[in-house]
Image (cartoon, rainbow, N blue to C red):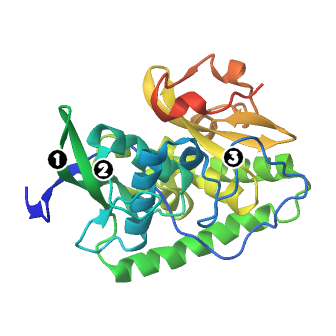
């Protein structure tokens, strides 16, 4: 491992990935209501549910990942700073949750892999601490990233046009859901091949039409974000295997949907996993019992 500044950079793997901020899309829906704790981000498009649920240490790390995501090819890590701007430390064991929350909140940074680096700054009570982080991009260069952004924007506009004339948030959500489910191929190989990183991102889903569950859930969230519809990714398991799905807010309550299961379903009529209550989804899904999933609202 190579040394950087005060400590060492260690690569850590995580199981999710994401996409890029665009200009146009669905207009803000008149019927969209603001649920408790799900405010619109002041930092760009999307709704930062996890950012708002974190403590100050995790939000500081989240902000550092945010800065690093904007300059993913920089060689220097980004210092973790508190609200006063002072460099601070966070337990290394808490970095994974901060990064996962950042990725789940921001499907528009599709160029990030699920891995990140951190700089060890010391030890506190036997807990390793970090004071800087950096992301690891999927593309090899800025040139490649620019090309991917252009391709992504075009693909996103294609989907958004499908929902442009829809009336109400539920109808928009259903049109986008059915469009993605009808065009994306579930790429099981990506679960075992570490080289297939795009399949875990919104880019893989909307541009390459190939993805696994996190890529599909991120793509769906991004399209809904662009339409002003609040959406959260839910980590957990399905039939005992790690899985990610969505909960979406309209008509003043949450509604769970699993795009992946409808994508792979052999049923003639799709939409079996669209607009379910948590009780209905829990028949074959289970949320994580700790970590970032515990505060995600239930769909009643």
Earlier-in-chain disc, 3 versus 2: 3
**Residue at the spot x=81%, y=67% of the render?**
27
- The alpha-carbon separation of the residues under discs 3 and 2 comes to 27 Å
**Picture coordinates of residue 271 (x, y %)?**
73, 36
Judge the density around disc 3: few (<14), some (14-19), many (≥20) Cα neighbours within 10 Å.
some
**Residue at the spot x=72%, y=48% of the render?**
178
Judge the density around disc 1: few (<14), some (14-19), many (≥20) Cα neighbours within 10 Å.
some
Q: Name the residue under label 3.
A: 38
Q: Is residue 173 among what the camera can see? A: yes
CB under 8 Å between callouts 1 and 2? yes
Foreground of the two, 277 or 30:
30
Q: Mark 1 points at which residue?
A: 122
Earlier-in-chain disc, 1 versus 2: 2
- The alpha-carbon separation of the residues under discs 1 and 3 comes to 35 Å
Judge the density around disc 2: few (<14), some (14-19), many (≥20) Cα neighbours within 10 Å.
many
**Picture coordinates of residue 46 (x, y %)?**
64, 59
Foreground of the two, 54 or 148:
54
136 with respect to 237 (left or right): left
Q: Find numbered disc 1 in the image and state the secondary structure of the residue it sits on.
A: strand
- The alpha-carbon separation of the residues under discs 1 and 2 comes to 9 Å
**Picture coordinates of residue 113 (x, y %)?**
35, 56
**Residue at the spot x=52%, y=48% of the render?**
104
CB under 8 Å between callouts 1 and 3? no
248 with respect to 258 (left or right): right
Q: Mark 2 points at which residue?
A: 89
């Amino acid at each position: 491992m190579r040394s950087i500044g005060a400590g060492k950079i260690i690569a850590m793997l995580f199981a999710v990935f994401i996409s890029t901020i665009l200009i146009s899309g669905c207009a803000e829906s008149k019927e969209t209501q603001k649920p408790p704790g799900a405010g619109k981000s002041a930092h760009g498009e999307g709704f930062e549910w996890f950012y708002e649920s974190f403590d100050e240490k995790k939000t500081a790390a989240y902000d550092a990942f945010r800065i690093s995501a904007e300059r993913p090819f920089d060689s220097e890590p980004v210092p973790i700073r508190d609200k006063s701007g002072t460099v601070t430390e966070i337990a290394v064991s808490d970095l994974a949750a901060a990064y996962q929350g950042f990725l789940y909140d921001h499907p528009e940074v599709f160029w990030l892999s699920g891995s990140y680096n951190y700089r060890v700054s010391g030890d506190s009570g036997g807990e390793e601490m970090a004071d800087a982080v950096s992301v690891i991009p999927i593309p090899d260069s800025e040139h490649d990233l620019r090309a991917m952004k252009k391709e992504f924007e075009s693909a996103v506009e294609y989907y958004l046009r499908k929902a442009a004339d829809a009336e109400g948030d539920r109808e928009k959500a259903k049109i986008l859901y059915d469009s993605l489910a009808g065009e994306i191929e579930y790429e099981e190989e990506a679960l075992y091949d570490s080289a297939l990183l795009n399949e875990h991102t919104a880019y893989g889903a909307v541009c390459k039409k190939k993805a696994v569950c996190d890529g599909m859930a991120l793509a769906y969230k991004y399209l809904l974000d662009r339409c002003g519809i609040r959406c959260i990714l839910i980590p957990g398991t399905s039939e005992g295997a790690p899985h990610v799905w969505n909960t979406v807010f309209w008509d003043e309550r949450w509604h769970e949907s699993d795009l992946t299961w409808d994508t792979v379903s052999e049923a003639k009529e799709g939409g079996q996993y669209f607009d379910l209550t948590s009780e209905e989804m829990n028949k074959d899904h289970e949320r994580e019992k700790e970590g970032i999933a515990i505060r995600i609202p239930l769909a009643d």
